[in-house]
Image: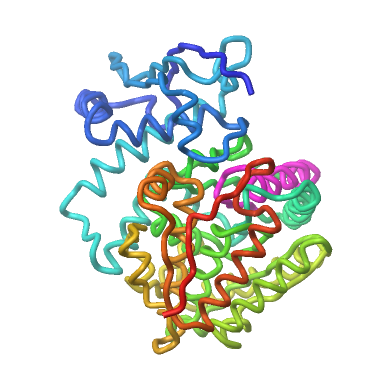
Amino acid sequence: MSTDLIDAQVSPTGQFDILSKYEIHKLSHESRGPQYQAFRNCSLAVLNSGGFMADGKELLETYADFDIFVVPTERSVKLQVKNAPAIAFVDGKMIRGIAEHLFAVLRDIIYVNSEITGDPRYDLVSAQGVTDAVFHILRNAGTFDRTRVPRLVVCWGGHSISGEEYDYTKKVGYEFALRHLDICTGCGPGAMKGPMKGATIGHAKQRDRHGQYLGISEPGIIAAEAPNAIVNQLVIMPDIEKRLEAFVRTGHGIVVFPGGAGTAEEILYLLGILLHEENKEQPFPVIFTGPASAADYFTRIDQFITSTLGEEARSRYQIIIDDPEEVARQMAAGIQEVRQHRKETGDAYYFNWKLKVSTEFQRPFAPTHENMHNLALHKNQEPYLLAANLRRAFSGIVSGNVKDEGIRIVEKNGPYELRGDPAIMRSIDTLLESFVKQQRMKLPGKAYIPCYRISAG
């Protein structure tokens, strides 16, 4: 990996072309305020797109001298970067897509913090208040189009996958695009890049010049999953919970490719929501898929879901192995049902207002050792509540694996301890052990040291 460094000034894109004097002053002032560190770290991740880093800690240490700040101009602002990764430039000029992503970071970290998360007018405690905030952040990012029919497929999966699995995700994305479907992912490498890469060819063949490649991230994870170059709309949500809600509110169907703890977290979040009584009549196509070599992976996921959440959870998805065309056909048919349901109920095509997302899935979870130890991992509760707590457990493991703060906490205090019903703990242990054996916890070539310890109690 090249560690050549470049200094540059970047001109504004999109909504930053024309700003008021007040907005220019506010952006300049707040970019050096309490949000500066998040702004700097996310900007660095964007500039390192295409680089190979296993986690946020490694990235920050490699580019410890990187800096970025807002430069006021008469009508707008520019961004000055110092000691930036050379991979973001071609012949000394920043790649346009990366420049767009850089201003998306400014918009979502600085602007959104001051206008939404830092504004007492927004109620970030109630379920409806959080959903309103998610809506406003997405609308401010320009992701909504009232004239567009339902066609957005959310693709989940790991950033650490095999070459065969990556090629398979490209084939599925290609088949989606041939059926005029768009792609939304966590915007990083691996299973988040492959479907977009395949879709660019499918859209080109169909002469579909308005393909949407939506990437949704959050500050804690973006370093390990930097936006890939194909993303033409980048949104950075304030935390993982709002990121997950953005996926399920904007997407019209979800495909899950092989992954690790982060993918398991996403699956548990989705199933927890779909298991809620108020969502039972919601059509929402969910497909687990991968090449033939991933069959065992999905068998283990299926067994884990059945043993912890039961047959009802299992009924909310289908598994299709090694058949990209069938995946695309089933997804296209499922999205037609979604469109019909939205028409009949009067719900928006671009944002699923009627989906019930309870506060258990919205409340930010801090993966401290105490919080991880105290998770209610037992069956004496509604299945959707168990799913919420299992989701938190996997969220903590993701933090300990790849997030700068989580890695440092585990280095200081040792592995997280998870305790619960013996049967549930055995299921978690078996699933995590399979991820480790299949090298799904870190990028290839990195030895994995578990950030967790499983105990029955």
Q: Quadrant of the C terminus?
A: bottom left
- Pick the front one: 52 or 45: 52
Is residue 88 left or right of 177 when viewed as pictured? Answer: left
Q: Picture coordinates of residue 191 (x, y %)?
A: 66, 50
* Magenta span contains residue 250: no
Residue under the image location 62 percent in, 31 percent down:
50
Q: Quadrant of the N terminus?
A: top right
Task: Identify the colour scheme used.
Answer: rainbow
The relative height of residue 87 versus residue 344 in the rendered view (above or below) is above
Q: Picture coordinates of residue 442 (x, y %)?
A: 61, 47
The reply to whether residue 348 is in sight is no
- Magenta region: 182-207
Is residue 238 left or right of 184 when viewed as pictured? Answer: left
Q: Say how many tags the image has.
A: 0
- Pick the front one: 317 or 262: 262
Residue under the image location 40 percent in, 59 percent down:
241
The relative height of residue 339 versus residue 2 in the rendered view (above or below) is below
* Magenta span contains residue 196: yes
The reply to whether residue 64 is in sight is yes
Is residue 329 left or right of 99 when viewed as pictured? Answer: right
Residue under the image location 60 percent in, 37 percent down:
228
Residue under the image location 46 percent in, 51 percent down:
400
- Pick the front one: 22 or 267: 267
Residue 25, quarter of the rendered image: top left
Is residue 129 left or right of 147 when viewed as pictured? Answer: left
Residue 346, quarter of the rendered image: bottom left
Q: Picture coordinates of residue 275 (x, y %)?
A: 49, 81
The relative height of residue 228 versus residue 180 in the rendered view (above or below) is above
| Residue farthest to the left, as pictured | 120
